[in-house]
Image (tube, grey):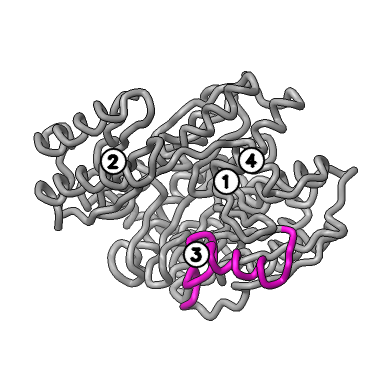
């Protein structure tokens, strides 16, 4: 297969918005109270169209810094005459949904997703529940960077109010439950749910319990500092151990903001996003419910996914790495289902963004209707061995300009021929370069990946 080089690195550090909103260390620029206040003012300026009372929904995960940043953001919005609807800790997709259902003008989520508690971030949703377009993010950034709003001060009678939405969690639970087929039930199933001490620690177990499942919950005691630590989608071994110990029918692990899902089968084996896409994709094809017979995945997904879907008469369309690019392609092409190997799974006919709980319900529906355990369903896909390495870098020059690296990639590509592929790309959120080699033999591709990593370290290693 052809070598796929990385997308260009992000613009220099002065750029606020990255591939998934703004992210950084809490109380260090850009994740400071001062900047949150400015962002609130800029967002308010952007959405104030017409004479109605404008409203913004705000949610967060369970990080200690969320309280500080939430207060600052709300202050900025209120200072520009916009009302704020505070929902507390809720999954990112819940805020997307509530923005639409509560007819707000925008939504905001304060979360750094799968990162440790020391980090935090923010992302915005439009009134339609989708992430803000790049051009709107750029306009907000311009307003903040050039201090264009300092002269705008609504009078005291026009200042916005902040309201606590006490039933926000209940609204989301009802919404999620309604995506599960009414003729099915989860009665008789035992499910381990790992909430990563994150945003879904209350709602995810409730959704499953109300559909009839016996739920064993772990990672549901957030203290502000333990989000993602040893639990959740980044640490599936914890879930797998609990499944083996309890004899559960399956396990599901979410990340800190619950937009990512990793599954354990009944034997305690990991079932990643690719396998879930294969299972659900085949079911959608069988029911003629996959538009244009197309599933959208990223360049990181295993070649086995392509083969599995092709055998059933469908195809896999690849995008750059990142759930935002999957979502963009779904909307552009009129498709309905896609995701990432890492567990971001988007059912566009049910939600406007990736939702771990809704993805789990989709998988459970296939499992219940088929009467088969997850281990049997996952056999639909033959997984090609993958070697993945991450290397910290001091800078991010164009990969094509690194002669030694390009030579190593071409050598590996030639050795693999049509039986594998190479992907080298920069991370969009970290100072890292990532190497993926896929082929027929694990030991072989581990060596190939190491060869490429050695050249990368010589050229740009930190």
Q: CA distance from mark 3 to mark 1?
A: 19 Å
- Image position, residue 457 (x, y; %): 15, 51
Q: Does residue 296 appear left or right of residue 171 in this picture?
A: left
Q: Residues within 10 Å of mark 2 (few under 14, many from 20)?
A: many
Disc nearer the start of the sequence (2/3): 3
Q: CA distance from mark 2 to mark 3?
A: 24 Å
Quadrant for the N terminus in the image: top left
Badge 3 element = loop
For the image shown, how many numbered marks are present on the structure?
4
| Residue topped by disc 1 | 354
Disc nearer the start of the sequence (1/2): 1
- Give the magenta-colored segment's residue range: 225-249
Badge 1 element = loop
Q: Residue at x 61, y 33 (%)?
A: 337
Q: Does residue 272 appear left or right of residue 434 in this picture?
A: right
- Give whichever of 442, 233 is nearer the camera: 442
Marking on residue 235: 3
| Residue topped by disc 4 | 379
Disc nearer the start of the sequence (3/4): 3
Residue 279 appears in which quarter of the rendering? Answer: top right
Q: Residue at x 69, y 62 (%)?
A: 204
């Amino acid at each position: 297969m052809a070598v796929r080089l990385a997308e260009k690195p992000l613009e220099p550090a002065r750029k606020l918005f990255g591939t998934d909103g703004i992210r950084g260390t809490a109380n260090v620029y850009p994740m400071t109270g001062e900047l949150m206040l400015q962002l609130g003012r800029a967002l308010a300026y952007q959405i104030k169209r017409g004479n109605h009372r404008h409203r913004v929904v705000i949610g967060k995960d369970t990080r200690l810094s969320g309280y500080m940043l939430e207060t600052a953001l709300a202050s900025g919005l209120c200072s520009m005459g916009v009302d704020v609807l505070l929902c507390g800790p809720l999954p990112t997709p819940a805020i997307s949904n509530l923005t639409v259902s509560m007819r707000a003008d925008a939504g905001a989520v304060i979360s750094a997703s799968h990162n440790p508690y020391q980090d935090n971030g923010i992302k915005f949703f439009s009134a339609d529940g989708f992430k803000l377009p790049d051009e709107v993010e750029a306009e907000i950034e311009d307003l903040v960077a050039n201090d264009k709003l300092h002269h705008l001060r609504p009078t005291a009678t026009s200042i916005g109010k902040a309201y606590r939405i006490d039933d926000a969690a209940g609204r989301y639970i009802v919404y999620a439950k309604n995506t599960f087929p009414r003729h099915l039930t989860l009665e008789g199933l035992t499910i381990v749910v790992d909430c990563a001490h994150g945003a879904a620690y209350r709602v995810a177990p409730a959704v499953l319990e109300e559909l009839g499942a016996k739920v064993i919950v772990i990672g549901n005691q957030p203290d502000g500092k333990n989000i993602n630590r040893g639990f959740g989608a980044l640490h599936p071994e914890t879930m797998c151990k609990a499944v083996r110990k309890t004899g559960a029918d399956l396990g599901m692990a979410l990340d800190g903001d619950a937009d990512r899902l990793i599954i354990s089968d009944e034997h305690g084996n990991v079932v990643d996003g690719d396998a879930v896409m294969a299972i659900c994709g085949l079911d959608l094809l069988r029911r003629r419910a996959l538009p244009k017979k197309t599933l959208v995945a990223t360049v990181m997904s295993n070649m086995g996914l392509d083969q599995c879907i092709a055998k059933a008469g469908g195809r896999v369309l690849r995008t750059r790495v990142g759930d935002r690019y999957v979502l963009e392609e779904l909307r552009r092409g009129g498709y309905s289902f896609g995701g990432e190997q890492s567990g971001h799974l988007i059912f566009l006919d049910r939600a406007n963004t990736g939702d771990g709980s809704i993805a789990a319900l989709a998988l459970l529906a296939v499992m219940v209707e088929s009467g088969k355990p997850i281990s049997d369903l996952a056999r639909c896909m033959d997984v090609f061995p993958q070697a993945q390495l991450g290397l910290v870098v001091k800078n991010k020059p164009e990969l094509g300009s690194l002669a030694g690296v390009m030579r190593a990639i071409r050598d590996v590509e030639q050795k693999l021929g049509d039986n594998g592929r190479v992907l080298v790309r920069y991370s969009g959120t970290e100072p890292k370069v990532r190497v993926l080699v896929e082929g027929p033999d694990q030991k072989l591709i581990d060596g190939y990946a190491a060869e490429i990593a050695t050249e990368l370290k010589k050229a740009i290693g930190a």
